[in-house]
Image (cartoon, rainbow, N blue to C red):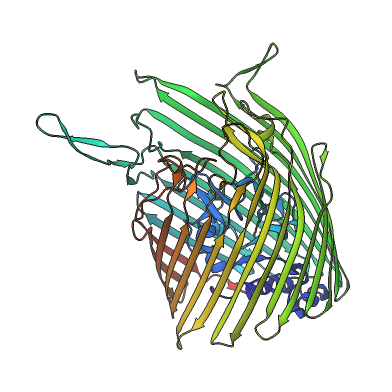
Amino acid sequence: MWGIPTVLRSQQTENKQNWAERGIRLREVEIKAKRPMKDIGVQKTVFDSLVLKENIALSMADVLTFNSSIFVKNYGRATLSTVSFRGTSASHTQVTWNGMRINSPMLGMTDFSTIPSYFIDDASLLHGTSSVNMVGGGLGGLVQLSTIPADQQGFGMQYVQGVGSYRTFDEFLRLTYGDKHWQVSTRAVYQSSPNDFKFRNRDKKENIYDDNYTIISQYYPVERNNNASFKDLHLLQEAYYNTGKGDRFGLNAWYINSNRELGRLTSDQSDGTRFENRQREHTLRSVLSWDHTRENWKLGTKAGYIYTWMAYDYKNDKGNGDMASMTRSRSKINTLYGQVDGEYFLTEKLLFTAGLSAHQHFVKSSDKNIITLVGNRAVVGYDKARVELSGTVSAKWRPIERLGMSVVLREEMYGDNWSPIIPAFFVDYVLSKKGNITAKASITRNYRFPTLNDLYFLPGGNTDLKRESGFTYEAGLSFAVGKDNVYTLSGSVSWFDQHVNDWIIWLPNFKGYYSPLNIKEVHAYGIETEADLALRLAKNWKLGVHSTFAWTPSINEGEPMSSADQSLGKQLPYVPEYSATLSGRLSYRSWSLLYKWCYYSERYTMTSNKKTLTGHLPHYLMSNVTLEKGFSLRWADLSLKGTVNNLFNEEYLSVLSRPMPGINFEFFIGITPKWGKKK
């Protein structure tokens, strides 16, 4: 169903969840409405299942890179990948999984390279003000990720084996069982690779000499990305029990075991065999849920637990073969989570919602090679606990079919610090039923508190940081047209304007290390557009096209931080002003050809925006192409798929001095035995 307009996809996702509740009237109310009540005024991007299940090698970072207007900052495959909306930073992006916020309490961000797209059944983006409906602190927006029941009768299995360049192996297995009440699923993903691709190092030059040892020419050497291997294992266990009378119980448990090396910087002149740069991680995320649905109201409760152990080691050869440990960082995070949500339809035109969530974090972080003296006591890190509360109430009203209005009030507490009331107001109006032309507008004031690393990291933490706050204004238009079994076309354009006070940014200081500070004011503004086309070309031919474009300046308009400050009026570091994506899928019977393209404009690495060799990263284009063939046999469904990544062998950098692979290839074979039947 790739290529279905965003508006229709959102309704289909909502409707699929509704029918799972066995036709309860609460959901019938929303089905009757052409626009779900929850989506009044909301700018929302919903990804269909075909995009999420494209191939097992994809992480959610890859999905977002080629299918959304948000910026994905990528250190390379299986290394840190963060996302940011509308010129904000990664810590301004909130991320939830099955309702539980999974942003690191230390860093405030989420590594999307550790989220296999095959583990996600439902994904959506809430841009800007829209995020206040679900969470606070999303000054840029919210990424919602979740799993859903397999909807299986009897036993089922799916297995996919992938082989790629640089001896890369990807394996996916899913076992399912379902009956009238139960849906049970076990998924596993294992990925490994030496990741030792070749690249041309533009940060080094080699000399060519004549017979008299006179330099007659120079060239950029071709090097190999040594010491960059990875091995990642993901296990996901799900179990759902539906009473058939409006109650559903669920369990989701996700385990990650990751062992990754970080390759040398392109500017590193040392011998690549004489160092080790490794990150290891063990993470468990688990959620228990109960959804209780009645005629015109619903109650949902969740309880969860997250455990993360992370180790980072950097070792260097002292010259005699003895590896000296330069960094020995260890972090342990325990998070307890609880949430209660309620919905009540007073009438078919008036919906009230309320919710309360709590996250209790216990964080211990240390680097045994960095010792700070506090009085007569040696300190190697920090050991802190912090509770985070978030409560919300909202009223959504549709007085007439064309008009919808919503008011949201949210309150948050981090530690012993309370935010002022976080208000948001949304309105949408159908200008024309012909074409479903809808105007939307919203306004909110949001807050984000410093992370634990912002406050306590050694060395560099700043306990005097202020919380960030900002007003955001949005307005936009959307449309959706179509003709049954011929075509559907939809699109949207949104303008936003955001002023953030006390923006937190990490910058180098005179002591030789980075430390966070507040910028007085940052002005982020711009335009986001999205368009979808699904077209039946002939009896067995179908074409789907999806495109996005974003113009997102993010300008420092605060007071000078020092007499030498050159950042005023300049774009913030690592924020592209322009980004765009284009995806096209051509299908003929069981054949499918997919082309994906993305573009990021130049990004600066310094607040001064100097265009030196290390001060900026050039713009780049990226193209991938995939050809797939499906086979339906009596005993199983088979699929063969070949992918060419970086089709035009683009030389590019997403992060300064981190090499990226050129053209590379992947091949996948999948098998789904016909043991059970889908409902």
Q: Nearer the viewer, residue 633 or 335?
A: 335
- 447 is higher (above) or lower (below) than 184: above
Residue depicted at x 83% and y 63%: 407
Residue 329 spot, x, y in % from top left: 56, 29
Q: Is residue 395 visible?
A: yes
Would you identify the image quadrant in which residue 521 lies? top right
Q: Nearer the viewer, residue 266 or 120?
A: 266
- 198 is higher (above) or lower (below) than 481: above
Residue sitting farthest toward the right: 346
Residue depicted at x 42% and y 50%: 618
Q: Nearer the viewer, residue 577 or 136?
A: 577
Would you identify the image quadrant in which residue 363 lies? top right
Residue 556 in the figure: left or right of residue 543: right
Residue sitting farthest toward the left: 211
Residue 166 in the figure: left or right of residue 175: left
Residue sitting farthest toward the front: 563
Q: Quadrant of the N terminus?
A: bottom right
Q: Quadrant of the C terminus?
A: bottom right
Residue depicted at x 33% and y 46%: 199
Would you identify the image quadrant in which residue 282 lies? top right
Residue 532 spot, x, y in % from top left: 55, 74
Residue 455 spot, x, y in % from top left: 69, 32
Residue 362 in the figure: left or right of residue 536: right
Residue 217 in the figure: left or right of residue 15: left
Residue 302 spot, x, y in % from top left: 77, 53
